Image (cartoon, rainbow, N blue to C red):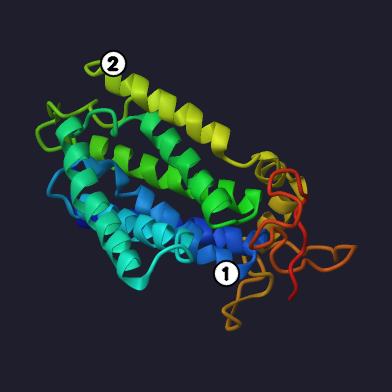
């Protein structure tokens, strides 16, 4: 299997490349670009969460502990004294970081259910839930983050399979086929639980209609194709007129910055059309 450094490096490059395309397509406000890129990087190390002493596992449960402890704190801030709030915050932090961490690793098996396509889909849907319902981002942004998470997750699984091929000896290692798989047949109950979690996450997530409409937009892909190469000079210095054909001027209004807003419009996240953000 690939090590942590390889996974984080490749995941960062892939997520950064996707972020560049997203920026060029001008579909989200700039403040959304960093969190969705981080979702892709997180996805590139998330499958190793089931390694008990792995850095991804410690970092993930540490982050979950901080998130839930502050969520509890803000929810009950007007009900209890400062001393009680301290206890609630610290108790939640310890419970998630160490208690949930221990329970998870007593049940999880490395290269089990978490190393599967079902887990990748669950992670993507859960990301949409967090972005849409917790962070209050627009539904289109939530599902774009889910897409970044899914691609990062798949990059991790693919790298593990590539590292299971011994090119010099021209053989497959025994670990080949244990990473990139639909589900783990060895643990049917765990697979069933992951399927149930996937169904729940899809049900809780905002509508993907805006994301699907944007992804299938011919105008967006035409705009990306137009911006793929410089029109006249590379970095304003080297002129290579033979590489790019002359493009006739486009009619219509100029593209505005961030056609998917940073947060859900009033009246709900799911069915509101994307509105152009201010320059």
x and y percentages locating residue 28 in the rendered image: 64, 61
Instruction: Decide which of 86, 22 is in the foreground and name it.
Output: 86
Q: Is label 2 or label 1 in front?
A: 2
Is residue 169 visible in this depiction of the protein?
yes
Residue at (30, 70) in percent of width and height? 83
Which residue has dot 1 on it? 31
| Residue at the bottom extreme, as displayed | 237
Q: Is residue 160 above or below residue 190?
A: below
State which tag comes first along the sequence, 2 or 1: 1
Q: CA distance from mark 2 to mark 1?
A: 41 Å
Residue at (54, 57) in percent of width and height? 135
Q: Is residue 14 above or below residue 73?
A: above
Q: Quadrant of the C terminus?
A: bottom right
Which residue has dot 2 on it? 188
**Image-based side of 32 in relation to 177, left or right:** right
**Image-based side of 153 in relation to 61, left or right:** right
């Amino acid at each position: 299997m690939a090590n942590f450094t390889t996974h984080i490096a490749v995941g960062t490059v892939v997520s950064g490349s996707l972020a560049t395309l997203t920026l060029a397509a001008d579909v989200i406000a700039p403040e959304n670009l960093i969190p969705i890129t981080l979702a892709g990087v997180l996805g590139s190390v998330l499958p190793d969460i089931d390694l008990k002493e792995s850095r991804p596992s410690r970092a993930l449960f540490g982050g979950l502990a901080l998130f839930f402890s502050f969520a509890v704190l803000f929810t009950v801030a007007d009900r209890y004294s400062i001393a009680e709030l301290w206890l609630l915050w610290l108790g939640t932090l310890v419970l998630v970081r160490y208690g949930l961490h221990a329970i998870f690793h007593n049940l999880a098996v490395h290269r089990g259910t978490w190393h599967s396509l079902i887990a990748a889909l669950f992670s993507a849907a859960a990301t949409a839930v967090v972005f849409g319902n917790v962070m209050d981002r627009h539904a289109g942004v939530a599902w774009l983050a889910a897409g970044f998470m899914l691609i990062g997750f798949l990059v991790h699984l693919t790298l593990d399979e590539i590292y299971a091929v011994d090119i010099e000896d021209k053989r497959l290692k025994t670990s080949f086929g244990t990473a990139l798989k639909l589900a783990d047949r060895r643990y049917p109950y765990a697979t069933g639980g992951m399927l149930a979690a996937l169904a729940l996450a899809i049900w809780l997530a905002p509508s993907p209609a805006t994301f699907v409409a944007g992804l299938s937009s011919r105008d967006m892909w035409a705009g990306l194709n137009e911006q793929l190469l410089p029109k006249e000079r590379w970095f304003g210095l080297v002129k290579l007129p033979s590489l790019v054909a002359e493009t006739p001027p486009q009619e219509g209004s100029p593209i505005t910055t961030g056609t998917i807003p940073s947060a859900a419009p009033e009246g709900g996240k799911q069915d509101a059309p994307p509105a152009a953000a201010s320059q």
